[in-house]
Image: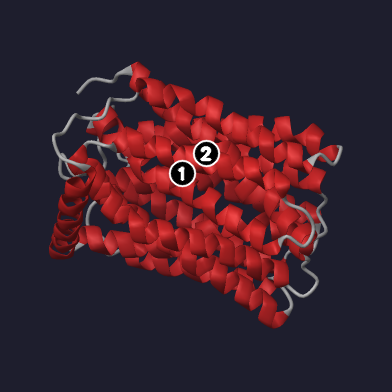
């Protein structure tokens, strides 16, 4: 297989598009707005509701992903499912503009739908990777996707900054919906077309379900993919919780203002982009397992240090250090997992990959929100994040695989 530049560019541009959602809606601006303005967070109640919204949406994604992955493989529906999930997320993000103070349930439902659409679509987006990149380039292409995604985060935040500074929050949500929709168009135009199958959606669904169950048994029998997924579930739990609650911690515990949060996140995205760029080739050259382990050591240290942080300046240093490992651990994980996937089963296997990743995003936010509410402080909750990184690292040490994809190229 040779590299098709049109496929690679359009695939990475989808990461550019959806990163606007990840940055503004999931990570920096909307979480703080929902927690502090719509709900109120004097007693940790906002943390609890935000954790619930993320956990419910991720639970739905986790439960549905393996079956939809099987349908996509058998029915040849990857691109159509990707379009459906993306459209659902875009419409829900645009609808956030109707929210006001006290509309807790409405905000909860809209963020569940938006997050379900965005995260569910990643199952089908990820399943394109083995189809558009030869094995000895999969680590690099995976990292390029995250690298372009961080550029999307930075640009969307720069677009959002003047709106936020002038208090135009509702216009911000609508702008992100437009950004997400427009920048996704190249993926729907240029990624490989869906295969034409004779089977109806229902027939594909039934066959997809059976194929998924077969894949589950296959992974259990092979053991190494199962051990990797369990490790991934744990350390990704830490990553997901950091993404979901870092801006809320900075605003609530350390007193960051919206403008400061945006500049902080821009710095994190810049270092994440740098980390993805620098580590792109080492993922293939050193092997994804070694790169993941290095990143988890960094993240464990960052989480423990964050427990003690007292000033904004110290948090700036910690956050930018964390950014160096953000894209690296995710790109290397995706590249590691592709080594276990038989040809023709990409969507099924990535459905189970999503099941592990999204299940982790169910557990972490709930635990963080509950600990924060119980103790009336977010600091004890941070230690739970460090535990997820450390335990995931220990289990990963016993997974065979993750060897270099290239030798000295």
Q: Nearer the viewer, residue 363 or 322?
A: 363
Residue at the spot x=30%, y=18% of the render? 4
Question: Which residue matches tag 2?
Answer: 275
Residue at the image point whose x is 35% and y is 50% from the top: 290
Q: Quadrant of the C terminus?
A: top left
| Whether residue 377 is situated above or below residue 13 in the rendered picture | below
Q: Is residue 203 left or right of residue 97?
A: left
The tag on residue 328 is 1
Q: Which quadrant holds the N terminus?
A: top left
Q: Is residue 199 left or right of residue 97?
A: left
Residue 85: quadrant of the picture: top left
- Picture quarter containing residue 169? top right
Residue 339 is situated, as x and y percent measured from the top left of the image, at: 23, 45
Do residues under tags 2 and 1 come within 8 Å of each other at their CB atoms?
yes
How many numbered markers are drawn?
2
Q: Give the Cα separation between the discs numbered 2 and 1.
A: 6 Å
């Amino acid at each position: 297989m040779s590299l098709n530049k049109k496929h690679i560019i359009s695939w990475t541009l989808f990461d550019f598009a959806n990163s606007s959602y990840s940055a503004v809606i999931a990570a920096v601006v909307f979480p703080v707005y929902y927690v502090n303005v719509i709900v109120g967070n004097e007693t940790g109640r906002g943390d609890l509701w935000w954790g619930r919204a993320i956990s419910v949406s991720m639970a739905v994604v986790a439960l549905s992903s393996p079956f939809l992955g099987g349908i996509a493989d058998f029915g040849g529906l990857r691109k159509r499912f990707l379009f459906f999930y993306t459209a659902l997320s875009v419409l829900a993000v645009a609808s956030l503009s109707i929210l006001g103070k006290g509309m807790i349930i409405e905000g909860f439902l809209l963020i569940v739908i938006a997050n379900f659409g965005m995260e569910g679509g990643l199952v089908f987006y990820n399943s394109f990777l083995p189809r558009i990149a030869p094995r000895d380039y999969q680590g690099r292409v995976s990292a390029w996707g995250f690298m372009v995604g961080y550029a999307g985060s930075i640009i969307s935040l720069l677009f959002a900054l003047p709106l936020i500074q002038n208090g135009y929050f509702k216009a911000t949500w609508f702008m992100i919906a437009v950004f997400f929709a427009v920048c996704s168009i190249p993926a729907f135009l240029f990624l490989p077309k869906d295969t034409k199958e004779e089977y109806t959606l229902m027939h594909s669904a039934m066959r997809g379900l059976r194929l998924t169950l077969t894949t589950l048994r296959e992974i259990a029998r092979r053991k190494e993919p199962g051990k990797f997924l369990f490790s991934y579930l744990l350390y990704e739990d830490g990553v997901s919780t950091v993404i979901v609650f870092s801006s809320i911690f900075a605003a609530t515990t350390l007193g960051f203002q919206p403008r400061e949060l945006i500049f902080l996140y821009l710095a994190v995205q810049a270092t994440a982009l740098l980390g993805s760029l620098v580590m792109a080739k080492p993922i293939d050259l050193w092997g994804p397992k070694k790169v993941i382990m290095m990143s988890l050591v960094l993240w464990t240290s960052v989480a423990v240090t964050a427990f003690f942080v007292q000033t904004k300046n110290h948090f700036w240093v910690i956050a930018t250090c964390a950014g160096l490992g953000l894209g690296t651990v995710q790109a290397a994980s995706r590249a590691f997992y592709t080594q276990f996937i038989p040809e023709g089963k990409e969507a099924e296997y990535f459905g189970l990959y999503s099941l592990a990743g999204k299940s982790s995003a169910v557990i972490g936010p709930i635990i963080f929100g509950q600990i924060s509410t119980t103790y009336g402080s977010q600091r004890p909750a941070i230690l739970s994040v460090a535990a997820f990184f450390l335990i995931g690292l220990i289990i990963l040490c016993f997974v065979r695989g993750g060897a270099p994809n290239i030798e000295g190229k």
